[in-house]
Structure formats: structure tokens, C-alpha cells
Amino acid sequence: MWSSGAIALEKVGHRAPAEMNDLGGNAKGGGKSSAAADKVVEEIRAKGGKAVANYDSVEDGEKLIQSALKEFGRIGECCVIYNGFLFVFQDLIHRIHLRGSFLVTRAAWDHMKKQKFGRIIMTTSAAGIYGNFGQSNYSAAKLGLLGLANTLAIEGSKHNIYCNTIAPVAGSRLTETVMPPDLVASLKPEYVAPLVLWLCHEQCQENGGLFEVGAGWVGKLRWERSQGQIMRQKSRPMTPEAVRDQWDKICDFTDATKPTTIQESLQASVSVLSRVDAGGQVEAPPSAAAAAAASGINPALAVGQKLPVSTFNFNHTQCILYALGVGMSTKDPDHLRFLYEGHPDFSCLPTFGVIPSQAAMMDGGLASIPGLNIDFTQVLHGEQYLEFYRPLPTSGTLTSEATIADVLDKGSGAVILLDVNTYSGGELICYNQFSVFVVGAGRFGGTRTSAKAKAPLPPPKRAPDAVVTDCTTRDQAALYRLSGDWNPLHIDPGFAAMGGFKAPILHGLCSFGFAARHVLKQFANNDPSRFKAIKVRFAKPVMPGQSLQTAMWKEGSRIHIECKVKETSDVVLSGAYVDLHQTRGKSASVSAQGGRLQSDLVFTEIGRRISEVGPELVKKVNAVFGWEITKEGKTAAQWTIDLKNGAGSLQKGPYGGKVDVTFTVADEDFMEVVQGKLNPQKAFFSGKLKVRGNIMLSQKLEVILKDYAKL
């Protein structure tokens, strides 16, 4: 056993007992000796460790396990890392490598289930992964171990039994006879043992992974699949000639996918069936116009289109129901402000802001958009961005205006960017960007990227500053759906099975709510007024009842987050972050400094001009303009320029009448605009200048700021 001794010795330093099994065979598979196992056991005991030697064949797996139980009382982890020599006979290779590993693991399995813990490490080989000349029997057995490990990872996860596979390169009794001594020295088993020890640790959540390791280097492998090509038509069978003619496309890994489950593997075939039934054909690459027509996606028609305005009426009941839906509980006293309407600081959770805005999609608004002829059974929620301009009220009527911001061609599908502005009366409360992925709707000749998309960001490459783990309940999806997402995928087992899931899955926006409130508590003292924005990418589904683990990295006012399922270590929210405002005390001091804002001088000059030529301005402009000047992310001053009523007026503070258009801009950016250093259009498209109301009236800004204010 080339590295078992090194791993066992490594375990000594971590106070872990070890059983050393070695038949002591020679390079041809013959002979038997206890010397190899005894030597390692002596080294372990000399260093103060616990060890026992075993000389049974791995085909007698029950004897190995009983030996360990007799000596240590429990099975901590089952490291099936046997990497036996290259035996001559096919049957013997499979008996020792594949069957032996299976038998040892089977003997340990029930003990691991009873103690609700186990770590299994299988050892495959590069010969099994890639193949090697003259090693067909060995390669077959070693790849078989990988298949065994992958299935054990799935079956064991619910019992806290994780299984991973390593493909090591190391010096051994075999390789030292064919490798130069200096190369054998650089491939010491000691350079493999630390990886195995970590994979065996109870804190390691890796499951179903495949790792190459050697000479101090570790890398993870995964499968990759090309987009492929449909070879048949509804009215014509598949032929070898069609395969031949499309071979380059079949082997083209542009926009390759990376399936990780058998459900994801089968999804391609299911998708093909629906496309063939719809009359999909094999033909030469179409023109951009023809591709758009064939896919049902035409960005030229869709981008800029507005969905019907949606209205959302709510009171404290919906706020509380949402808080319960994302895991809040009266067990935590800090949660009471979100669960009890009589609390002195009763508030609505910030991420509730997605609920009124999602009605734009839930009500079928996308179906009314020209250029978006899509199959809604193939729609997935890809990413979400939410930004606040005011804390959410706890009751009232909110209206949401949705616009198709862009449509992207990702090859394997289309991405629709949907921008939604949500208002309370005439006041902009929040902005959402939904990134919707439509499977199979790509290849219409569109662009892959957009400057309008809110991009996800990777977390810093260091240990997180905080990690919070929270359990979802079996009924989490059933509870969350009461906030308005009625998709049967989250409640109906039959519908979930049609999507390739073994059970209904949790809403992505529910996981989104869990992670956001973890940040709110950890870094904002549960103060919703400090919550500015959140961005996430939905990476994998969560099953109700699993635990969500949110890792957080603080970088200034931005908190990077990554959310995993604790039981499987699958990342479910990636590229995510939350932006926070400064504390209330600091923002209050900003407001108190209103008189020191640079923009005050500009509005003072505007007021002077209005007093001189107000009637003339009213005739030219005929509009009421509102200005919200911010400092450090908080509103520091409000101004209203009334050039519609009477002789015109300038007012500081809230305005009692109707405002035609409102501009929100930072104090320093406002000065850049009025001095001509920053083009207003560029400020708008870069997000520095936000406009709500009649945006066309912004063209009259120059009349006010330049012609009459003489700035």
C-alpha cells in the first residue's frame, strides 16, 4: 500500500487511530508478508499513536472492520485507499481493487450509519481516468472505483457519510524499481497524505469530489460536455451520414456545460425530445435573422418593451409571513421586530422587496412581449439584484414598472434581463433586476454580455470573517410559497420529478432571504435601514430540510457572501454580495451638515434666477422637478424647483404637490454635472444619476442649470 503508511503516520499528529492493512505482496502479486504492515505500526506506536496491523485480504472486508472495532471501538473513517500492484490476471485485478474496496466499505457502512458519521476515500488512478497502454484490466477496475464512490456519495449524504476519490501520483514499492531515485523522492506519499486526512475530517463538507494529487499539488477534476447537435427530425430517422456531417459541432466545446448529477445528464435528452417533437431540424447554421426567428427570440423587438404595470397591496400580515418563510423565528429575540406588528421597531425585511416586483413575471407579463416567444417550462431564475432607495413600508400599495433591459445569447440558452422599479405613490422605493435563463433558446445571433447587467463578484481569497449556519424545515418551501411564488416545482412531487428532481426544491429566493438576513444580523445589527443592495447568482437547488451555511467577507461597506448546503457542500448562492449604508449615527451627522453641501450653492443661485425671470422659465419649462442629493449613500437634502405654477419657486425639503420628475444624485456627482465635467447621459447610464417620473423632461435641465443659472 504505497501511501497508507504515510496517511497513518500523518493521523498520529492529529490523535487519530489507524489500522494498517497490507498483505505484503510483491510486484507480481505473489507472496505474503507481515513485515510492511508491522513496520508502519511500530513507527506509529513509537510516536505515541494507536495502531493495529491487519494482514487479511481486502476481500475479507468484514475481518478488517471487526479488527478495527475490537481495537478502537468505532469506525471513524473508512479510507479505502488500496492501490495494489499490477497483477497479471484480469479477475485478480478486479477482485483486489474493485471488489475488495466494495467489500471493506460494505462491512463499515452500517457502523457509519448508526454513528451518523463516516468518511470514505477511494483511490482511482490516472490510468482509470485517462486510460494507459497495456493496462486495460487495471484501468477498468480503477474507473469502476470512481463510479462506486460517486454512488456512495449520493446514498451516504443523508447519513453524514461522505465519499471522495483521489488519483494520486506517488513513489511506492512498485515505482521505485522503474523511476529514478530523485523522482521517487519528489513523489513522496507524505505529499498525498494531508489531502486524505482533510477529506476524512468531520469538518470537511466535500462529497463526491475527484482529486488529482502528487508532489505537493492538489487539483479537482470535473466532467465537461459539449452542446452537441440534434441528429434527427420528427419525420426522418437519425443516420450515420448526419453524424458525420455534424461531427465538428458535436465535438465543439464552445459554451460547454459541466453536468454534476445524473438528472443534469438526462436533461439534455429530455430537452432534445421536446425540440424534436416541435419539429427541430438539422440544417446549416442560419443567418442572424433566421436564427432569431427559429429560436423565438428577437432582441430588436424585445429590448425596451415595458410589461403591464402591476399593483401590490399589503399590510403587516404579508411582512410577517415573508419573514417566517425565510426562516425567522420567535426563538431569536432579535427576530421579533420582523414578526410582531406591535413591536416599537416593527419593520419589513429588506429582501421582501422582491415580492411586489416579481408579480411582473408571475402574472405572465413576459408572454405579452414581442420578440420573446419562449417555452415557460424551460425558464430558470439565474441571478437577482435588489437595491433600495427608501426602507420598505410595512403596509400600503406598491406599483411596479418592468422593462426588458436586454436579451443575451448564451448559446445553450437565452438570458432575459428584466428591470423592475417599485414605487410607493410617486416615490421610488427599490429596484430589482431579474436575470432569467431560458434553456434551449440561444443561438439567435445575439450578444453574450451586457453593460446593463449587474455583475456577480467572487469573494476574497481568504478565510471568511463570519460563517452562519441555519436549518431549513421540511415545510420551508410550503411556507415560503404563500408569499406569492406558486410554482408547483416547490410543492408537487410529480411536477418536481418532471424537472429531474427527486423531491420538490426550495425557492432560490428563499435561500436568498436566508443569506441576506444572516448579513443583516451579523454586520448591521438587524437594522433594515442600513441595507442598500444585494446581488446573487443561483448556482444549485436546495432541498427543504437541508442546512444553509453562509460565509461572509467584509470589505468596507460591502459584504461578500457564499451560501452552501452544509450536508453536501454544494454552493447554492455564488458571486454574491450585500452593500450596506453607514450606521444611523453617521448618516444623521451627514444630514446635519446639509448647509455644507456643495450643491446648496447651486440651488441658491437657481432660486435667485427664478426670482428674477421665473415667469419666463415657467413658459419654457412647464414642469416640477424634484432633487434628492445624497451623501455617503444617504439622502442629505431635498429640493423642489416648481416651474409650472404661478411665477415659479424653489423649495428645500419635502414637496406637498405632485412632482413630474425626480433626480437622485450624489452631491459630488451633481457638481460634476452642473460644471460640465460629467455628461448627464453618461451619469444616467453609469447609475450615478437616477431618474423617476417623466424622463423626457430631463432634456430641459440645461435650460435651468446653464442658460439661467449661468453655471
Image: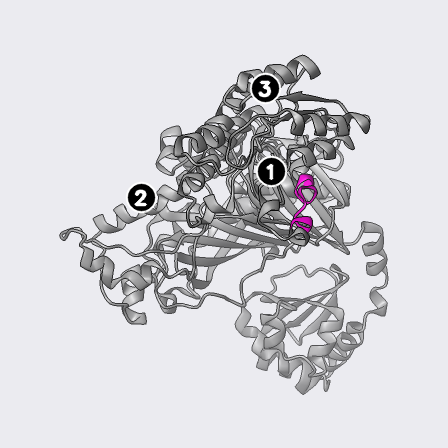
Reading the image, the residue beneath label 2 is 270
The circle drawn on residue 64 is 3
The spot of residue 68 in percent (x, y) is: 65, 18
Label 3, label 2: how far apart the Cα atoms are = 45 Å
Instruction: Determine whether, in the image, residue 246 is placed left or right of residue 73.
Output: left
Foreground: disc 1 or disc 3: 3
Q: Residue at x 82, y 64 (%)?
A: 594
Along the line of sight, which residue is nearer the eye, 687 or 604? 687
Which of the two marks, 3 or 2, is nearer to us in this view?
Answer: 3
The local crowd at label 1, few if under 14, some if 14 to 19, many if 20 or more residues have their Cα within 10 Å, is: many
**Percent of width and height locating residue 587:** 81, 56
Q: Residues within 10 Å of mark 3 (few under 14, many from 20)?
A: many
Residue 461 part of the magenta segment: no
In the image, residue 543 above or below residue 536: above
Nearest the viewer among 126 and 683 is 126
Residue 462 can be seen in this image? yes
Left or right placement of residue 585 versus residue 478 in this view? right
Question: Residue 18, percent across and down?
Answer: 69, 25
**Residue 203 can be seen in this image:** no
By secondary structure, the bulk of the magenta-drawn segment is best described as helix
Q: Position of residue 281 (x, y in %)?
A: 21, 58
Tell me if 201 is positioned left or right of 636 in this view: left
Which region is colored magenta? 184-194
The numbered disc on residue 138 is none
What colour scheme does the image use?
Answer: one colour
The numbered mark, 1 or 3, whose residue comes first in the sequence reads 3
Name the residue type under label 3.
Answer: Leu
Residue type indicated by callout 2: Val
Q: Identify the element where label 1 is drawn.
A: loop
Is residue 100 or residue 535 the one in the foreground?
100
